[in-house]
Amino acid sequence: MLGEPSAEAAGRADRTGRALLGVHELSVAYAGAVQALRGVSLEVPERGILAVLGANGAGKTTLLRAVSGTLAGQGGAVTGGTIELEDRSLLGLDPARIARAGVVQVPEGRRVFSNLTVAENLRAGGLAARDKGARERARSWVHELFPILAERATQRAGLLSGGEQQMLAIGRALMAGPRVLLLDEPSLGLAPRVVEQIGEVVREINRQGVTVVLVEQNAAMALAVADRAVVLEVGRVSLAGSSRELADNPEVRDRYLGGGSEAAPRSRRAPARGEELVVDGVSVRFGGVAALSDVSFTVAPGSTHALIGPNGAGKSTCLNVLSGVYGASAGSVRYGGRELRGLRPHRVAALGVSRTFQNISLSPTATVLDNLLLARHRLMRAGFVSDGLRLPGARRERARHEDRVREIAALIGLEPALDRGVRTLSYGSRKRVELARALCAEPGLVLLDEPVAGMTREESAAMADGIAAARGELGISALVVEHDMAFVMGIADRVTVLDFGRRIADGTPADVQRDPEVRRAYLGGEA
C-alpha cells in the first residue's frame, strides 16, 4: 500500500507559483467521430509534478499528444478548448515548435532509435537545444542521472534492457532542455527495483526546475512522487486534488492501489497440441557483453511457463533467440525434436511458434479483423494478389479463415471489436488483439513478451482469462515474460528466473517465491 508522501512532495505545491501549463475545456476526437477527451481542464504549476491517472482508454495519452502537438499523426484533432504555456497558445503549433518552446514528451513504449548508439540517440535529442554549450551541459546532466548511458555510449540502443531503454528515452528528452517534461508510462514493463529508480529520477529532474506531467498506470509510484493528481474517466476529469488527498480517497485506493491480478481460472484442458520446448545451454553475446550464459529450461506440452527476472536479466533476449530474431553463440533450442537455432523467424513460425511483443506492433489504421487475418496468410493457399483481386477461390478461402478468426476473437473476448480500427481501442484491448493475432497463426507454442505491462487490474484479469481460455480450448503451450508477479504466479505451472543472463532458479511458483536468491535479485532484498 502506498506510504505517506515525502515532506518535500507535500510542501512543494505550496512553494510553486503560477500555472506554467494550462489546459482549459479541451476536447479531442479521432477520425472526426470518436470522442477521446470531453472538456478537460487542469493546471500544472511551475516546478510542480502533476500525475494523470485513469484506466486504459480514459484519455491520458491523448492528453499528452494534444499538449505536445502529435495528435495529427494518430488521426486525432483538437475540437475545442485551449492549451497554453504561460500566456502562449500551443494550439496549431507543430511538434518541433512546441519542443523548442520547452514542452518535450517521452512517449509510451520508450521508442528509442534501436539501430543508433546510445550517444547518437542523445545527440538526436539535443537537436532542439539552444547551442552547443547547452547540449554539453545537458549531456553531462543525463550522464549524472544515468551513469549506465555513459558506460554504454557506443552500444546500439536496441541491445539495452527495457529499463536502460527507458533511461535513454528520458535522457534523450532532457537533451532538449525542457521546461515541461511529459512522461507517458515511464514504469511500463519494468521490474520493481527499476520502477523505484525511475521514481527517484523524476523527483531529481523536478528538483532541478523541470515541471513534470506524469501519466502512469502505477498509481502508487505516481502519487508518491507527484504534488497533485487528476483522474480521467471516459475522457473527463472525475477527481482532482493533492496526491495525499487522492491516495487517501477510498475510490482511488480500491481502483488503482489495490492488489495484483486475480489468478486465472483453470479451465478445462484440450489435448496438448504443442511439442516440448527444450532450451539447453544457450549463450548469447553482443560484442563483449554476455546477454545469456548457459541458460537451460524445458516447457512441457500444454503448460504455461513463466520466465522472470529484473530488467537486463536476458528475458527478451531469450525470446528473440527462440523466435529466430537473434542467433545464439552456444547451446541448442529444440521444439518437438527439431533444432530451431539458426532458423529465420518465418521458418520458426512455420513450425508452430508464434509470439507477441513488448511494444505493440499492430497496424493502427486497419481493423481488428484485418490485423487478425494477417496472421492467417501463411496458412492460405491464395496469395496476396489473388486475395487482393477478390477472385472467387480466394473469397471462399478468406471466408473460411474469417470464421476461424471470429472463433478465436470470441475466445479472447474481442468479437464486438472486430470491425473497429485498432487505434480506436484502449491500450489493454490492443494488447489482447496482439494475443489473438498470435493465436490466429494456429501455433503449438506462443511466446508472450510482457502481456500485461501497463494494464489495470481488470485488464490484467481479462488477459489472464484469455490466456487460460486459449490454453484450455486450443491445447497450446505458453512461455510468458512478465514483471507482474501476481499475474505470473496465478497462471504459471513452472517458473524460470534469470539474473544477469544466468538461470538462478527453476521450479513451481511456490518454490520460486520462497527462494531467497530470487527475492534478492528481483526485489533488491529480503521481503
Image (cartoon, rainbow, N blue to C red):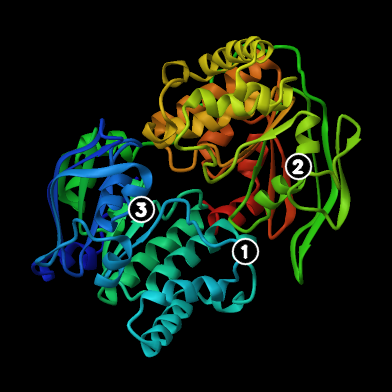
For label 3, count other residues whose C-alpha is less than 10 Å away and answer few (under 14), some (14-19) or many (20+). Answer: many
Residue type at tag 2 = Pro
- x, y percent for residue 440: 63, 23
Q: Nearer the viewer, residue 105 or 452?
A: 105
In the displayed structure, 319 sits above or below 370; it is below
- x, y percent for residue 164: 54, 63
Q: Tell me the distance, in whole angstroms, between the alpha carbons under discs 1 and 3.
A: 31 Å
* Residue where numbered disc 3 is placed: 221
Q: Describe the element under mark 1 as helix, strand or loop.
A: loop
Q: Nearer the viewer, residue 78 or 341?
A: 78
Q: Among all residues in the image, which is located at the extreme bottom?
A: 133
Q: Describe the element under mark 3 as helix, strand or loop.
A: helix
- Residue 115 numbered mark, or none: 1
Q: Residue at x 55, y 74 (%)?
A: 120
Q: Is residue 213 left or right of residue 261?
A: left
- In primary-sequence order, the first of circles 1 and 2 is 1
Q: Tell me the distance, in whole angstroms, between the alpha carbons under discs 1 and 2.
A: 19 Å
Q: Nearer the viewer, residue 122 or 141?
A: 122
- x, y percent for residue 283: 82, 56
Residue type at tag 3 = Met
Quarter holding residue 407:
top right
* Residue where numbered disc 2 is placed: 345
Q: Tell me the distance, in whole angstroms, between the alpha carbons under discs 3 and 2.
A: 38 Å
The N terminus sits in image quarter: top left
Q: Is residue 189 left or right of residue 248?
A: right
